[in-house]
Image (tube, rainbow, N blue to C red):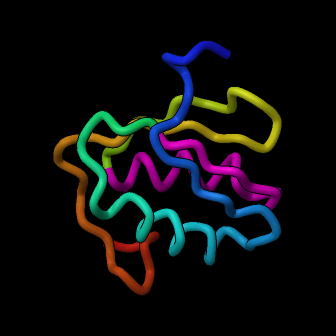
């Protein structure tokens, strides 16, 4: 992996269910600027489904799984707002 692929932020959600992982992710990116590259570390088997779905809901760009258990996304300038207590809902 080259420096251009290193994340600007990493959210460690290993050992968490996706519900808690999404709460942590939403909080971690709340003040991040557009274009921020975020890597999410996750062990929940639902992560490969839930993270792309959350990106679709919010408008962020899901970039895939650069390494096993690591999911990459790039933040958009105008994300759709989600509920702080339930980031899987608008």
Q: Is residue 89 left or right of residue 90?
A: right
Q: Residue at x 71, y 41 (%)?
A: 70
Q: Residue at x 49, y 47 (%)?
A: 9
Q: Is residue 87 left or right of residue 76?
A: right
Q: Residue at x 36, y 81 (%)?
A: 84
Relative to residue 62, is residue 14 depicted above or below?
A: below
Tell me where residue 11 appears, x and y as whole percent: 58, 56
- Whether 42 is among the magenta residues is yes
Relative to residue 35, is residue 50 depicted above or below?
A: below
Q: How many numbered marks appear? A: 0
In terms of image quadrants, where is residue 12?
Answer: bottom right
Q: Is residue 7 left or right of residue 31?
A: right
In terms of image quadrants, where is residue 83?
Answer: bottom left
User: Is residue 15 or residue 90 the one in the foreground?
Assistant: 15
Which part of the image, by quadrant, shows the C terminus? bottom left
Relative to residue 4, is residue 21 depicted above or below?
A: below
Seen as rendered, the residue at the extreme left is 78
Which part of the image, by quadrant, shows the N terminus? top right
Range shown magenta: 38-58
Seen as rendered, the residue at the extreme front is 3
Tell me where residue 57 appears, x and y as whole percent: 38, 55
Seen as rendered, the residue at the extreme top is 2
Q: Is residue 80 left or right of residue 72?
A: left
Tell me where residue 25 appears, x and y as whole percent: 50, 63
Relative to residue 14, is residue 36 depicted above or below?
A: above
Q: Residue at x 53, y 71 (%)?
A: 24
User: Is residue 44 or residue 6 the one in the foreground?
Assistant: 6
Tell me where residue 29 appears, x and y as whole percent: 38, 58
- Whether 65 is among the magenta residues is no
């Amino acid at each position: 992996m080259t420096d251009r692929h290193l994340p600007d932020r990493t959210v460690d959600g290993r050992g968490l269910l996706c519900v808690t992982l999404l709460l942590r992710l939403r909080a971690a990116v709340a003040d991040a600027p557009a274009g921020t590259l975020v890597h999410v570390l996750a062990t929940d088997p639902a992560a490969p489904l839930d993270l792309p779905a959350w990106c679709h809901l919010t408008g962020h760009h899901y970039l895939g799984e650069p390494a096993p258990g690591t999911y990459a996304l790039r933040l958009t300038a105008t994300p759709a707002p989600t509920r702080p207590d339930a980031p899987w809902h608008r």
